[in-house]
Image (cartoon, rainbow, N blue to C red):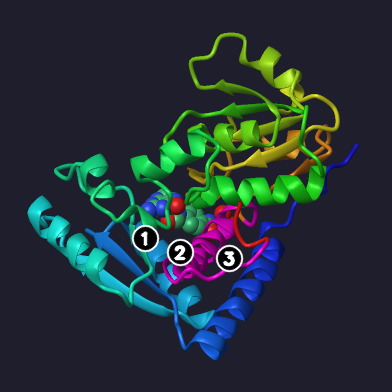
Amino acid sequence: MTARIIDGKAFAAVLLESVAEHVSHLKQTQGITPGLAVVLVGEDPASQVYVRSKGQRTVEVGMHSYEYRLPADTLEAELLALIEQLNLDPSVNGILVQLPLPQHLDEALVINAIDPSKDVDGFHISNAGLLATGQRAMVPCTPLGCLMMLREYCGNLAGLHAVVIGRSNIVGKPMAQLLLNESCTVTVAHSRTRNLPDFVNGADIVVAAVGRPLFVKGEWLKTGATVIDVGINRIEQGDGTTRLVGDVDYDAAKDIAGAITPVPGGVGPMTIACLLANTVAACCRVHFLPEPAGLTA
Ligand SMILES: Nc1nc2c(c(=O)[nH]1)N[C@@H](CN(C=O)c1ccc(C(=O)N[C@@H](CCC(=O)O)C(=O)O)cc1)CN2
């Protein structure tokens, strides 16, 4: 069996087109242009790339982009003051603080300082609690993108057994909540789970978000399973160059899975598209406008 390739890039392009249409509609009918503020602290090279890409996509879909680049030694009080300023600014509908933060900053404190209605990353404890209780929430972008692709490839998810490998607050836990809300039977596993291959072998859906390159082996999978690989790991090759790989051993998995996301070009591009979809949703909510169907969970 050769798996269908779940093309996240193509998926994201369709979603971004839909976001752009809604932005244009908001402008024409309400005179409103949604705005997204992205805050980067420090000079982490990967974060700089992601922040630049977020700014570019924001402008491409017709929204206002506000970018704040702060030095690595920014004081917590200075960062909190900026967040408060953005919380109060009506032209800003979404606020995102790029992670990881430098070590001296308390990530939870910073995230929870964001107005939950502008928390387009869905990381604030209020949004995590709403999601966990099955209520309307801002949903974290990476799991939201995974869910959209799963719905497309699997159809109705009810009753399917999903194994989520990884228990982070930004991917593993919200992913498990989203799948539970779809009536999946969900197992949350992690790098220390005993007999992990046995769990994976029973799964109709495998979401790998463990942060270890090529961790999930092809022979662990059930034939025909749908595999979503959230991992983005840069590994060195013998010749001194590097390449990106996921948490799943793609070359082996593609011969056993029914459908699989590649790395790169799978989940990653959906993360930014979902961020912009969440920003449109936040803008509609604050203006008491109907939310565009199909853009978010
Ligand atoms: N505040 C946040 N911080 C971080 C998040 C997040 O959702 N919110 N997620 C990641 C980084 N990230 C977005 O911020 C992100 C990562 C990867 C991609 C992506 O498109 N990856 C490409 C490959 C890119 C490459 O060549 O390096 C792919 O998978 O095809 C987009 C966004 C951590 N921080």
Query: CA gap, disc 3 to disc 2?
Result: 9 Å
User: What is the crowding at mark 3: few (fewer than 14 residues within 10 Å), some, or many (at least 20)?
Assistant: some
- Observer able to see residue 216: no
User: In whole angstroms, how far apart are the C-alphas of marks 1 and 3?
Assistant: 15 Å
Return the mark for residue 291: 3
Q: Quadrant where the N terminus lies?
A: top right
For label 3, the SS is: loop
Callout 2 secondary element: helix
Q: On the image, which quarter does residue 17 sit in?
A: bottom right
The segment highlighted magenta reads 265-293
Residue marked by disc 1: 118
What x and y, as percent, mark residue 254?
79, 39
Q: Nearer the viewer, residue 129 or 221?
A: 129
**On the picture, is 51 further left or further right than 211?**
left
Kind of residue at disc 1? Lys
In reply to whether residue 284 is colored magenta, the answer given is yes
Q: Residues within 10 Å of mark 2 (few under 14, many from 20)?
A: many
Q: Amino acid at mark 2?
A: Ala
Query: Hey, which quadrant is residue 105 in on the image?
Result: top left
> Is 172 located above or below residue 282 in the figure?
above
**Residue that badge 2 annotates:** 282
Q: Mark 1–mark 2 contact, CB under 8 Å?
A: yes
* 154 inside magenta stretch: no
